[in-house]
Every structure is written in structure tokens, then in C-alpha cells.
Image (tube, helix red, strand yellow):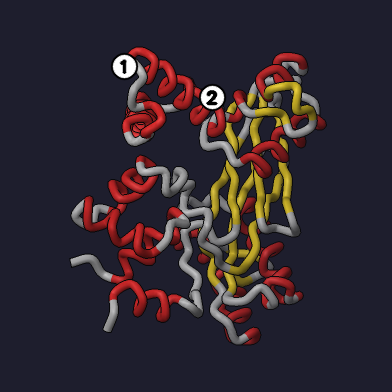
Amino acid sequence: MITASQVKELREKTGAGMMDCKKALEETQGDLDKAVDWLREKGIAKAAKKAGRIAAEGLTRVKVLGNKAVVYEINSETDFVAKNDQFLQLLDLTGEALLGNSVKTLEEALAAPVNGRTVGDFVTDATATIGEKITLRRFEVVEKTEDEVFGSYIHMGGKISVVVKLSAGSSAEVAKDMAMQVASMNPSFISRAHMSQEFIEHERNIQREIIKNDEALAGKPEKVREGIMEGRLSKSLQETSLVDQIYFKNQDMKVAEVLKQEKAEVFSFVRYAVGEGIEKKEDNFAEEVYNTFGN
């Protein structure tokens, strides 16, 4: 039996209507990932990108110190609290602790010393004083060699934070631009070479099913439909590949051209957006459940 919570989770991942989500889950025996694919194949939903539609409050930050950078996220219950001076101070102290200590887990991060106390102490204090649950949700540390270059960018005061690592000789300007590109266009990979064959085949099968369900192409020869499918697959993969994206500063250039022109190469990037994958309460959900499932 398909539950309301399953439907809600699928809806939040895809943006599809509740009845469509319920149908997808019924068709796939409740398998969430297969239900996402089913909706995409029917043209009802686009590819889910790490549940990017789901929102939560708080801020992300990126801090760089020498050859070490860290991207991290601290959540609060309301956007108002994210502007609180104590919350902002907690953000800064946490960044200092993450850069100043060798930590790999959230437990180690909360135990990291800063200003004579621990990050966990400051989180507890903020929760008690502000009156909302404050959480250090995640972080990622990136290290580079002396010659490599970091590019970082914080968007909308911390709604999105990015750090990019580039090859030696890359200019500070192109490093910053690459961080802004990642923030604005949200690629999943540096290039197609970084995509697993399994991922590419999965996307190919999705496009093949979309073609199969397109009545306008029903009379086309198999070779023609296969060509259309490969074209759509290529476009889909380009959108998720950093170097194949259109450069945000010049719509006539791709990122790969800019990097070649600047004699630069992107080695890695980390992008955090506030609330990715966190469920936020929706006031009208009860009504939608009633309309979908009845009494």
C-alpha cells in the first residue's frame, strides 16, 4: 500500500502533482528511485537534482585559509534566525574550527576547540538563547598544493556557497568565475569523463523511454528515433557537465573554451545550497492528502 508520506517525498523530489506521484509509486511498487524515472519517462518531471526543490532555513559558508578550504552548512528553523548576530558569530567560529583542526566527521567537528570551548558548546548556547534548534548539518574540507588555486563564491549571503580547485597558473579572476558558474548553473560533474558509465546508461534509458512515449515520433524509423534519443542524451549530459555548460559571462562560449583560453583546468568543486534534501513543513499538505487518499 502506498502511503501519504511516500507520495509527499516523491512530490518534493520531482515537483509532480500528488496524483501523478501516487500513480508512479503504484506502478513501481513503491520504489522511490524507479518512481522518479517513471515520472521523467512520462514527461511529468525533470531529473531530480539532489532534492533541490526542498527548502530549509540557515546559511552555508565557504572559508579559505592558505591551502585549505571548507564549505559548511548550519541550519535553523526560520530565516529570521539566520540573520541573528549570534547565529552569524556561530558561523564564523565554526569555520575557524573546521580550518584550524583536522576533522572528518560531524562528531569531530562539534568537538573541535575554538576560543577555549568547542563548536558543540556554541551550538548549544545558540539553541538555548535563540530558542530554535540550531544544527551543524554538514561540511567538506578541500586541500590543494602550493601551486594550485582556489576560487570561492558565496551567493545571497550564504544561500549557496562554492569552492573550486584549479590548476597551477590559473588567475584569481577565472577561479572566482568558475565558482560563480558552479553556483549559478549547478553542474554535477566537471566533464563527461567524470561521469560513470552506469550514470550515462541510466540517462540514455530515460531518454529512450521518453522517445517511446512520444506519439509524434511513433511513425519514425528506429534509426531516426535512436538519433533523436542520442541528441537529447547529449544535451542532458551537457547541462550537468561544467565544461560543457554555456559560460554565464558570455553566452557565445562554453566553459571549456574559457578554461582553454585561460590555460586553466578545474580539478574539483563543492557546492552547498541551504536545505538540499531537508523536508520543510507545507501547510496545505493535509488538504492535499485528503483529496488524494480520501478519509
Residue closest to the eye, 160 or 98: 160
Task: Give the position of the C terminus as an image quadrant.
Answer: bottom left
Q: Residue at x 48, y 64 (%)?
A: 278
Q: Amino acid at mark 2?
A: Ser
Provide the residue designation for mark 1. 222
Taking 161 as reference, is 237 above or below it?
above
**Secondary element at image label 2:** loop
Q: Is residue 147 visible?
A: yes
Classify residue 218 by image quadrant: top left
Residue closest to the eye, 198 or 122: 198
Taking 8 as reference, is 204 above or below it?
above
Provide the residue designation for mark 2. 191
Q: Residue at x 55, y 27 (%)?
A: 238
Within 10 Å of the Cα at label 1, are there few (<14), some (14-19), or many (20+) other Cα atoms? few
In the rendered image, residue 262, in percent from the top left (x then y), is placed at 77, 18
In the rendered image, residue 170, in percent from the top left (x then y), is placed at 75, 23
Instruction: Report how far apart the C-alphas of labels 2 and 1 lie in the structure.
Output: 29 Å
Task: Give the position of the N terminus as an image quadrant.
Answer: bottom left
In the rendered image, residue 152, in percent from the top left (x then y), is placed at 72, 42
Taking 160 as reference, is 56 above or below it?
below
In the rendered image, residue 44, in percent from the top left (x then y), is placed at 42, 48
